[in-house]
Amino acid sequence: MSTNVNLNPSEAPRRTRRNLYSWRGPVKNVCILISRRCLGSFPKAGYNNLRSNMDIVRKVMCQESTKFKRVWTKDSKSSISYVNGRIYFANYSCCYSSFIPTPQLLYEVPRYEKLQRIEDVILCECPLGEPLARASDYTSSLIAVTGHNWLLRFAADTGEPFEWIYLGAYRNFRYITWEVPQETLVVKSVQNATYADQSVIFYLAVFNVFPLSLVGVLEIDKKVFGSNVCDAMISDGLLFISHTPGLVRLYSFKNIVQECLQKEFVLGETSSWRGETGIVGRYPFGIPSNITLTERPPVLFEVPCLDNAFELGGYPWHYIITPNKKKERGTFHICSMEDHSLVKNGIRDMNCRTLTPDYLNFHTDSSERILHVGPRQIIVLKLKEIEGDALKYEVTEDFIIHAERVPEVNKSVTFTSSGRRVKKWIYEFLDDDPDEENFVIVEYEDELDMLVVVAVKQTEVDCKARIDLYCNQTGKLLKKFLLEEYWDVTYSHVVAFDRDTLIHIEEKPNRNFSCYVYKMCCGSEES
């Protein structure tokens, strides 16, 4: 798609320049956006400098003359990770920056003796406008859990270690996630049958950040929550407990801490626990499990669902489940958290015949919308109040994105030249038939407000992936381009789109990994 760009800022309409102080809708002229950026932000403006810059990037990207070119490739025998403009190799001991035109090495350090193998990481960035206790807190960092039960915080750009916290040897901790983004994190243990205390099946260690401090370590005990507990996690102040028959229960984590915290521990201070004395967070004392329940707390909410697939979101809160029956697989229900009532048009089913199932989840753009993604179409749904009844909600279709496919023609009945009627056997193909175009990955680029869709079609001689960029508000196709490398549908793929950069990471057999980096090129930069 081409975009008209005025090369001379003075040619911008005077009327538009007079209205720079107020937002009057989307601006299509790049030069006007550049003029706004020079003047800066104003109290009455509904935009800021970053948003103005991203508008410019998006408009330049959507021009026909703009191409995406593969500028860098690197193979590895260990897993590759991409985190916010940084590509990590060799268990995070080697880092490349992808912000520049061609990725360059940021740091390469020997593996720390205590680091061993990193199992999981999250990116930690300081809040804006808040004074922090230590200078290192202002630095972007990664918080990682290692195979030897260490919690490590190190600089994202240099690899310099800031903090080591020993979690303890009573269980293997392997997973880390945000309980509240950039405020509270949770480190989760694996379920391991080799431990003597079989009633406690999970431990959840909760920390505050800025500075890193301990909230507590919660035991998930089968004697308290039931013998059929199969999973547990903490998010947004709620404790989620999953049960094997297909049941999810929610509890208040705040109330559990207030009522069941046996002793407060402070990292770095000497303390005693059950006859042992040591420094909290140091080896070998670690962090004791100090939140123990003797009876099940009050249940805030429970719902049966297939495979314990439960998604919570929207405002007011709604949830998405598949009813706990095998025949309902592929059918999704959108219900209100308040009374379990099904919203109007809340049963969604694509009727897909696929090897890879479709999925339904809340959009990550905080718009209260819902994405229903299948191999042949992407449906963006809107959750809104029913007119005349503010307490009831309905689901409507915002827009639909269709894969490029040849329309199906029913040729079960044909006629010969003499007019004789002939019936033919028709074989039904899967919706994700590799001979047809299929959607395999859908991501959201928040700064450009785009949906990034990977479409794949396999032929007898080749299999190429195409990147489609859609407007997140309207579903309009803005840009599409092919990836240069062969796309093997049997490999595991990760695609990340960050401003003017696309990262493609694929995992091949025998733990062979490859990373491909594409950059936006304009005009002469293409050559």
Image (spheres, grey):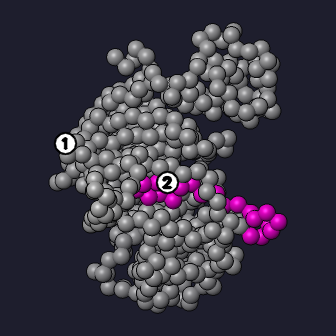
For label 1, the residue is 461
Residue density around tag 2, few if under 14, some if 14–19, many if 20 or more, within 10 Å: many
Left or right, 253 with reference to 407? right
Q: Which residue is at a point 76% across and 18% down the rendered structure image?
A: 17
**Marked residue nearer the N-terminal end (2 or 1):** 2
Q: Is residue 378 visible?
A: yes
Question: Element at badge 2?
Answer: strand
Q: Which residue is at a point 68% across and 10% down the rendered structure image?
A: 11
Q: Residue furthest front?
A: 418
Kind of residue indicated by mark 1: Val
Q: Is residue 273 visible?
A: no
Left or right, 260 with reference to 432? right
Q: Position of residue 357 (x, y in %)?
A: 39, 65
For label 2, the residue is 378
Stretch in magenta: 372-392
Label number found at residue 127: none
Q: Position of residue 27 (x, y in %)?
A: 68, 27
